[in-house]
Amino acid sequence: MITIWGVCRSRATRNIWALEELGLPWRLRPVIQANRLLAKGIDPAAPDAPFNTRSREFLRLSPAGAVPVLEEDGFVLSESLAINLYLAGKTDGPLGPATPREEAQMLQWTLFGATSVESPALAIQTLFGAGRSADDPEVKAAEDSLLRPLAVLEAHLTTHSHIVGGRFTIADINMAEILRYAQPDAALMGRFPRVKGWLELCQSRPAFKRMWQAREAEPA
């Protein structure tokens, strides 16, 4: 049985989506982020604090104190994108690589998303969530940082229906979940229609909808 330590309102959504696509048996062990408790005035170290990323038991599993973490038969793996690559690779199905070259391409696009897209995309989500407008200088700076990588992705999707292999794979899940952070910026997404259409297609999948429903049902 696969255990995902984390909560739906975290990067664990990437793993939950993948697991729902793969149909693997799994369970969620709730671990709330310590910074969310601090924001509510709760001391993560207090004896009555909810189980969180600074709890001793969790730190033994993940010294970095970050969710999500996968545990399976004594095997422990952190980093959500690495977890997804592992899940896709361990199963014989369309989400994983069919050849060593596809495996390399899935890794390439996952690293591209993590290094070139995630930070400015996350900044956009955070700024919009804080009520900043599209003409805010920090929003503009984040948009500017995304122009080159989104242009690369737009060009790729001009000649490819999906990220790798002409089919929906773990590379699509990884990139879609990274890019989701920038989705509130309608003006930015509108500049890249193929990226926007591909993202909406990914999010129309039943497995994504099940994951998102669970996320929405979880307390903020």
Image: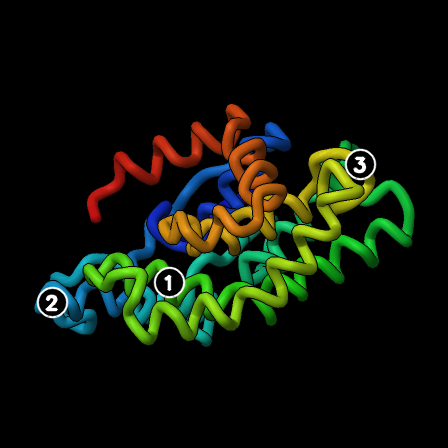
Quick one: SS at disc 2? loop
Query: Which residue in the structure is indicated by mark 2?
Result: 42
Please name the colour scheme applied to the rendered image. Answer: rainbow
Q: Between marks 2 and 3, how big is the CA–CA gap?
A: 48 Å
Task: Provide residue 150's location: percent of width, then percent of height.
Answer: 60, 58
Q: Between marks 1 and 3, how big is the CA–CA gap?
A: 30 Å
Query: Which residue in the structure is indicated by mark 1?
Result: 124
Q: Amino acid at mark 1?
A: Ile
Of the image marks 1 and 2, the number of the one nearer the N terminus: 2
Label 2: how many Cα within 10 Å (few below 14, some 14–19, many 20+): some
Task: Provide residue 107's location: percent of width, then percent of height.
Answer: 74, 59
Query: Which residue in the structure is indicated by mark 3?
Result: 166
Q: Quadrant of the N terminus?
A: top right
Give the camera-side residue of 113 and 20. Answer: 113
Q: Examine the image and state in which quarter residue 90 appears.
A: top right
Label 1: how many Cα within 10 Å (few below 14, some 14–19, many 20+): many
In this rendering, is residue 159 above or below 68?
Answer: above
Whether residue 5 can be seen here: no
Q: Nearer the viewer, mark 2 or mark 3?
A: 3
Label 3: how many Cα within 10 Å (few below 14, some 14–19, many 20+): few
Q: Amino acid at mark 2?
A: Ile
Whether residue 145 can be seen here: yes
Task: Provide residue 51's location: percent of width, then percent of height.
Answer: 26, 58
Q: Between marks 1 and 2, how big is the CA–CA gap?
A: 27 Å
Q: Is residue 60 left or right of residue 199?
A: left
Considering every residue shown, the one lying at the far top of the view is 206
Quick one: SS at disc 1? helix
Q: Amino acid at mark 3?
A: Gly
